[in-house]
Amino acid sequence: MVQFDGEDLIKAFHYSTKLPISILGNGKIEQSLPENLKTAAALAADKSILNLQYGPQEYNTVQYISTEYKELFIVYVIDDTYVIAVGPLLMEPMHSGEIVNIIQRQKVPIRLKSRLEVYYRDVTQVSTQTYYYCGRLLSAIFGAKNTGVPKNPHPIGSEVSSIKEYFQNTYKNREKLFTHPPFFLEKKIVNQIKIGNLDGALSTLDEINLLSRATLAKDPLRSMKDSIICSCAFFTRAVIEAGVFPDIAFTYSDTFIQQIEKMDSLAEVSRYERNILAEFIKLTKENASAKYSRVILSAMQYINDNLTLKLSLSDIAKHAYVHPNYLSSIFKKEVGCSLTDYIARRRIEESTYFVAYTDFEIADIANFYHFCNQSYYITTFKRFLSVSPNEYRNSDRPSL
């Protein structure tokens, strides 16, 4: 094994791009800039500071990955021992609602929410183009001729005779490298779903499907079904971000998954992915002419994104670009309940996850969702769900 000494190279990258970068040896950080590298996993007391799940170790290759904490990394594989990791990065601010989802999925103690909010606020944000081209820069800086590591028979971007050949080799390597769609393609299709661009979304889906699908089961049909179900979940999140209410989006998703499970051929399952995408985009377009006005939809979206923060009428009205008195009046007319009741119900609905699936104290959950005290939380919980939090927690099948 050739010893890798990349200190000068990571300095050149870091001080040129201002992005965090690390050298990992056998999965452990040997050098990093900045020296005290922070990650969400470390804040959540996870097992390691960097737990990057990258693909098969093909030497001199770039991979774009997202962690379970929604951080972005660019990984460059030197050899069986050494890996270069750029990150953590974000492409857009992390909203409170997304942090709550991470806390739920990763079973992070809710007391750490404020620390995570500070952490995500400070993570470097980059554009899609910067994210992609920094991977290209890694390939140029850490190529075999610079590190002394034996060359891969199929290197990215080395010893090519023309720009055309370079891009052809890059594309071929992308096909081999990504077992999941690269993040910039995911962002592209999300934006196309949000604006209802069916032709563009289908084109991007075709581009994604040129890459190798992840093997999710030994049986090819089961693996394909699981892959399309993952796509369905991804499209569901996209339409919710576009303003479709979660209960509607998840009803669609459940229907599509039931149809997938009934299918018995690879071709049928594969074709159905395009139908799912088309139906979700149709749903997005219909949502634009929903019964709620733009002002109400904007207010609801702001509320749903910030349920674990302090919400005031003036802040919500400011976000919706209307006077607080006007918002309060039309909200009751269009939604059928007061703004205060809507906020309380949404907080109760979201808090049921922590009641049912964690051992957190009821008082901590109440405080997490900004109820003034445990007693008021319990009273409000019973008003909306007809059971107390403890009864809900102890029930066999808790559901809304």
Image: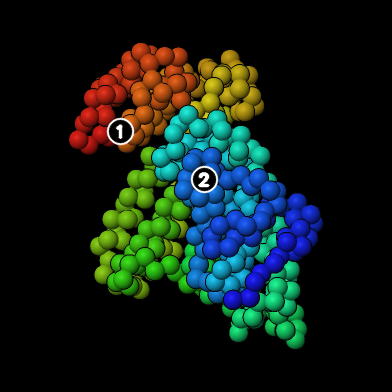
Q: Nearer the viewer, residue 37 or 236?
A: 37
Check disc 2 and give the amino acid type.
Ala
Q: Is residue 4 visible?
A: yes
Residue for point 75% across, 55% down: 14
Say which element carries label 2.
Answer: helix
Q: Residue 258 appears at what percent x and percent y? A: 28, 55
Q: Nearer the viewer, residue 117 or 130?
A: 117
Please state if 291 lies on the left or on the right of 254 as rendered: right
Check disc 1 and give the amino acid type.
Ala
Which label number is shown at residue 356?
1
Judge the density around disc 2: few (<14), some (14-19), many (≥20) Cα neighbours within 10 Å. Answer: many
Please state if 304 lies on the left or on the right of 224 as rendered: right
Task: Report which residue position mark 2 lands on.
Answer: 41
User: From mark 2 to mark 1, how far is it between C-alphas?
Assistant: 24 Å
- Residue that extends furthest to the bottom in the rendered view of this protein: 161
Q: Is residue 201 visible?
A: no
Say which element carries label 1.
Answer: helix
Judge the density around disc 1: few (<14), some (14-19), many (≥20) Cα neighbours within 10 Å. Answer: many
